[in-house]
Image: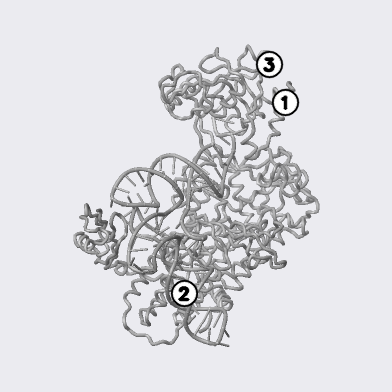
Amino acid sequence: MSRFNALTADAKWQAVWDERATFAADDASPKPKSYVLEMFPYPSGKIHMGHVRNYTMGDVLARFRRMTGHEVLHPMGWDAFGMPAENAAMEKGVHPGAWTYQNIAAMKAQLKRLGFALDWSRELATCDPGYYGHEQALFLDLLAAGLVYRKESAVNWDPVDMTVLANEQVIDGRGWRSAAVVEKRKLSQWFLKITDFADELLDGLSTLDQWPDKVRLMQENWIGKSEGLTFGFTVADDVSATSPIADERRIAVYSTRPDTIFGASFVAVAADHPIALELAAVNADAAGFIEQCKAGGTTAAELETQEKLGFDTGLKVRHPFDSGWMLPVFIANFVLMDYGTGAVMGVPAHDQRDLDFARKYGLEVRRVVADDDAADPVFAGEEAYTGPGRLVNSAFLDGLSVTDAKRAVIERAEAGGWGQGSTVWRLRDWGVSRQRYWGTPIPIIHCEACGVVPVPKEQLPVVLPEDVSFDVPGNPLDRHPSWKHVACPSCGGAARRETDTLDTFVNSSWYFIRFASQPEDQPFDRAVAEQWLPVGQYIGGVEHAILHLLYARFWTRALRRVGRIDVAEPFAGLFTQGMVTHETYQDPAGAWLSPDEVADGRVVATGEPVTVGRVEKMSKSKKNTVDPSPIVDRYGADAVRWFMLSDSPPERDLPWSEAGIEGAWRFVQRLWRLATPDGAPVTDSPDHDLAKRVHRTTAAVASDIEALQFNKAVARLYELTSAIEKAAPSTDREAAITTLLQLVAPMVPHLAEEAWALRGNDGLIADATWPTVDPALLVDDEVTIAVQVNGKLRDTLTAAKGAAKDALEAAALASPAVQRTLEGKEPKKVVVVPDRLVNIVA
RNA sequence: GCGGACGUGGCGAAACUGGUAGACGCACGGGACUUAAAAUCCCUCGCCCCUACGGGCAUGCGGGUUCGAGUCCCGCCGUCCGCACCA
């Protein structure tokens, strides 16, 4: 019997699918539309196992949807801008564009080799002017709508590489590449007004019922809505007369606990609060303290251990409800300038941080919320009370609940004109300026006379110049002789082009719309795009749970606001898949070893014993990566795809192993043997049991795939395969084999095509429909009943489905095993669950 | 610190709304075929006691609810993830 030759079959069917454009999506199709999308890759040079797993899952769903009568859009493209291309340019002297396009070609070949049902005619790369030019147009739309602005902002500046670094690229205060100490620098940056959409983005989460709760929660926390009171403390004249800040009348604070206002014992401002800075200008001690605050680290561990420190400014403020009550003002290292108003009211009894601070500086700790009878105004504990209760020691608030007291204080503040109920968000506007070459040029011209001038749309795209060099650090656009200097579109005078480029997250914020519709003269055709959107199923790594997914949601809503498209949420269904992991190996010296340096527990080269470490995410640093390409060459695309779907639930990590891929390969061969006609005589005698099994598996596998529970579908397919193997030759068996091929087709498409053709079927199995299920065959007429005594299984019996309770009880009591266990005792009670079990309580 | 997820054989895991725990796969062991090997096929495979029949114990630990708990409730322990001085 022949073996399935994956090498030739893969190439053959991939070519056929290509020639016939089998997977091209038809915008005009009358079928229901289904948009299946996996997060597009960064063209780093090679695909990795994570890509293979991600794209295999999407592919199974896409092929399944085609078989169930959908017009499927399943595209692929390249998230092609970004720093690695510039790093390669600096290290190897290649142009970022050349490097990127080489990588794209290599990775595309690798993806093709896996036989994904992709519509390659819609392939796009974000570094193509044909893409980013339209992005520039969209940016200008947002600018015109007031959703883009420019402001000075502090950035992480690497003084050696002369560039801005993202927070993720700053490790222990140093640049990840240069190891130079990173400076905070003020630069004029472009921002997108994502905070305008904070409410919408938060409320929209509740409509995303096909998203993992975890991701929704992460976004909710990131948006960070909180409600409270913003109000002013008046600086007391008598004290401040001696202070240099006598003309500063009020200090605004924000509190989510206005109810505790009578428990306040101090006000604290951030080290970079205007008041702190003014004081520092005339007071060396204050200046020293502020420096000390800035020096403190910001890593988790450092914050954990960092002491709460304060500097008494000598200023006093008046309590809003008692002008004779003076509160000291501190500069404190735990107050953040960029949250709320940069100043807080300290209520030690009911906030742990305030309590720590008050104990350290000997401030009053006054109880104003009591959870029981403890109304003593002196709060003695070391743990602040933050729970519910009634107000005490609080004048007109006494006796109110926390909720009512909050409302009462806000009302009074608003009536008295000294405060305002307010909502504060953690979410910040999105800074999109990057001092980088390899990104979308921001389509803006700076003119001395006219100021900021948008590039007229007819002059788009603003194309990146090719003639750039990376031999000096910094942004080559900034020192380009001609590109940078242009005439002002408005007055014609000498002007300067914006040399910053857009954050790459902008590129990935609308690529799914461009996939749906890609005319040359505009970013997308609204009507066509709306046919496909939202994406029905989006699949990718959980590492994008916040940034990419939040930015894309924002960008889509922003496009809706400017009238470009009427879609609120871009991704109706989201699935975050687990990682591919592998064992780790170390030699006796502790050096990491790659899997192919190890055999039989020994280092191949030296014969030394190997320490096998834990199973971890594949990473270069631990050397536990496995390159998919040689594996695909050796076992074929189908075995790799099958392994990716087997065993582990898709949201969990998948441990890669040699034995696992071998097992998958064996199954592919097993299917092949089963599907290859062996010339044995076939009888007409019906095989009812097998037919039932086929229908049941068809229904179950369909619902498993819909739910993305591929591991369960795989298990059922194993069972069906075994059952068919064991069945005697018959026409039913032959039909079962044909159905089995249809069921496995989304997973192992090459083998399915080859066997489909071999068995004389017309057309491609890729174009076949999903087998229909006869509901009548899904029902059992016999069921197995568990027989328990005191909840313990003693016997099982077979009964007709729907058998009467009495009959089941009688049959159970008659069981010899039951009689033996009862030892003549009378049953006290018998519980009968029809079609399930009988439990005899003795 | 706050929030979340998870904990089932040697391993990856199944188990519908509480109803036969361990489906399916991997590994290990035994057997058939073969001169031999590979490939393939068959059998065993949670732990303990027993020759066997059979029985006991088992879903991180301790309680509880129930005729019946992997599943529900309470309290611990552990692992992983996210956020983090957010007022």
The subunit letter for the residue under badge 2 reads A
Mark 1 and 3 residues: CB-CB less than 8 Å, in contact?
no
Query: Which amino acid type corresponds to the residue marked 1 in the rendered image?
Result: Ala
Q: Earlier in the sequence, mark 2 or mark 3?
A: 3
Give the letter of the chain under mark 3.
A
Q: Could you tell me if the residues under marks 2 and 3 are in contact, i.e. CB atoms within 8 Å?
A: no
Residue depicted at 75% across the width and 57% down the height: A89
Q: CA distance from mark 1 to mark 2?
A: 76 Å
Q: Which residue is mark 1?
A: A287
Does residue A179 appear to the left or right of A634 in the view shown? Answer: right
Above-or-below relation of A422 to A206: above
Residue A105 shows in this picture: no
Compared with residue A798, is residue A672 higher up or lower down, i.e. above or below?
A: below
Residue at mark 2: A765
Counting the numbered discs, the total is 3
The residue lying toward the viewer, choosing from B11 and A788, is: A788
Check if mark 2 and mark 3 are on a common chain: yes
Question: Chain under label 1?
Answer: A
- The residue at which mark 3 appears reads as A243
Say which residue appears at 54% left-offset and 17% top-offset. Answer: A319
Q: Nearer the viewer, residue A439 or A408?
A: A408
Is any part of residue A76 visible from this angle? yes
Q: Earlier in the sequence, mark 1 or mark 3?
A: 3
Local packing at callout 1 (Cα closer than 10 Å; few below 14, some 14-19, many 20+) is some
Q: Amino acid at mark 3?
A: Ser
Color theme of the render? one colour
Give the distance between the C-alpha atoms of the residues marked 2 and 3, in whole angstroms.
85 Å
